[in-house]
Image (cartoon, rainbow, N blue to C red):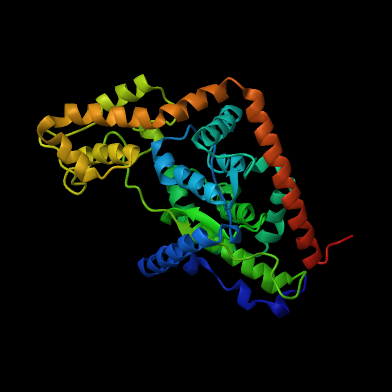
Amino acid sequence: MSTTTDAPQAGTQDAGDALAASSSEASLQRTLARSEQIERQIETDPSAFRILTGDRPTGNLHLGHYFGTLASRVVLQDKGVDTYLVIADYQVIADRDGVGPIRERVYSLVADYLACGIDPARTTIFTHSAIPALNQLLLPFLSLVTDSELRRNPTVKAEQEATGNRPMSGLLLTYPVHQAADILFCKANLVPVGKDQLPHLEQARVVARRFDERYGRVQADQPVFPAPEALLSKATNLLGTDGQKMSKSKGNTIEIGMDADTTARILKKAVTDSDRHITYDPENRPEVSNLVLLAAMSTGRDPHAIAEEIGDGGSGALKTLVTEAVNEHFAPIRARRAELAQDPGLLERVLAEGNARAEAVAETTLDEVRRAMQMTY
Ligand code: TRP
């Protein structure tokens, strides 16, 4: 290989710092302002956008997922934005030893999506492992990144630490590039993300730009891949029932698909404090305020108004109210979910159709990539 003459190119400049900077405060403010602008644009022209987002099938979705992202995905879909949802099964094996009960988890995700209002006629639901043309994009994309920028990706670092310094697999190191393929295969221009995922989006933007610089175009006037933008999700600040960061492994979550009795049991054991007068004061009373917030989100009411209504009723009244609020909001969703669970054939059909649609799109993109790279034989 005699590439030394044209290296380093502008496009191969190390982007590790840019990735880290994407979560800096100034950059965050810019992204937030731009997100708000995009929100307004969606109101007038939803067809200008294609969204890709998704989840790892590592367990059942909980209320943090629901209020954090799932509900807003449904809103965007209903506004007419073309939406793709990846069930990221290849991400599951990046930092663990086996696949676990992957089939059940994948179908459980599909059931959660449909129960919450995702419409498979409008939203394409697919799994990584079923889309060969998407996975093949990983090879040219890997040529566009360096190992040092991958090692400095803040999300990769955080996940590496979360595994208790288990030796890093090649897949964990490169998964941001695979995630770039998730976004770019369908030429999504908008990715709803929380701020912790911003470095990933920056990685996808870097890959899109470098592909253009290094391998060129099929049509002179437009790059093969548009640079995707973030739609920054508003932080919900919802904590677990113990007032700690919500996490399945801490057992402090309420799953979307749980029944009303289980929900009541979990909320009954929720941590509160000894002050009988209920207030909404997240700073000083995180546990009580979190329950107030959950009630507020489930009813669409203002948390201060809810706290005031309970007043001196104490944590008992608060727990009764939040349990009713959650169970009432999720009753129709849970009923639909239970129906879907009775119909595995339907879930299989939805996924098979989504996979077929995603594969067709991926094939078209891969074809363009081959042409841009002159690998057409
Ligand atoms: N990494 C995301 C998560 O853990 C899931 C995901 C996979 C994703 N591919 C994506 C999110 C592409 C946004 C865009 O939740």
Indicate the position of residue 334 as horizontal and vertical percent values.
46, 27
Image coordinates for residue 134, horizontal then vertical, percent: 70, 50
Position of 86 compared to 274: left or right? right
The residue positioned farthest toward the front in the image shown = 44
Task: Using residue 253 as the reference point, say whether residue 74 is left or right of it.
Answer: right
User: From what the image shows, is residue 172 above or below residue 257?
Assistant: below
Residue 111 sits in quarter: top right
User: Residue lying furthest right in this view?
Assistant: 377
Report whether 216 appears left or right of 261.
Answer: right
Q: Where is residue 158 in the image (x, y as percent from the top left)?
A: 43, 51
The residue under the point 69% across, 49% down is 135
In-front residue for pair 355/210:
355
Total numbered labels placed on residues in the image? 0
Query: In front here: 258 or 215?
Result: 258
Identified at 61% across, 55% down, the residue is 183
Q: Is residue 262 above or below residue 354?
A: above
| Residue 352 picture location, percent across and down | 70, 35
Rendered image quadrant of residue 314:
top left
- The quarter in which the N terminus is drawn is bottom right
**Quadrant (top left/top right/bottom left/bottom right) for the C terminus:** bottom right
- Whether residue 86 is visible: yes
Q: Is residue 282 above or below residue 142?
A: above
In-front residue for pair 142/366? 366
- Residue extending furthest toward the bottom: 5
Give the residue drawn at x 42%, y 56%: 195
**Is residue 98 among the parts visible in the rendering?**
no
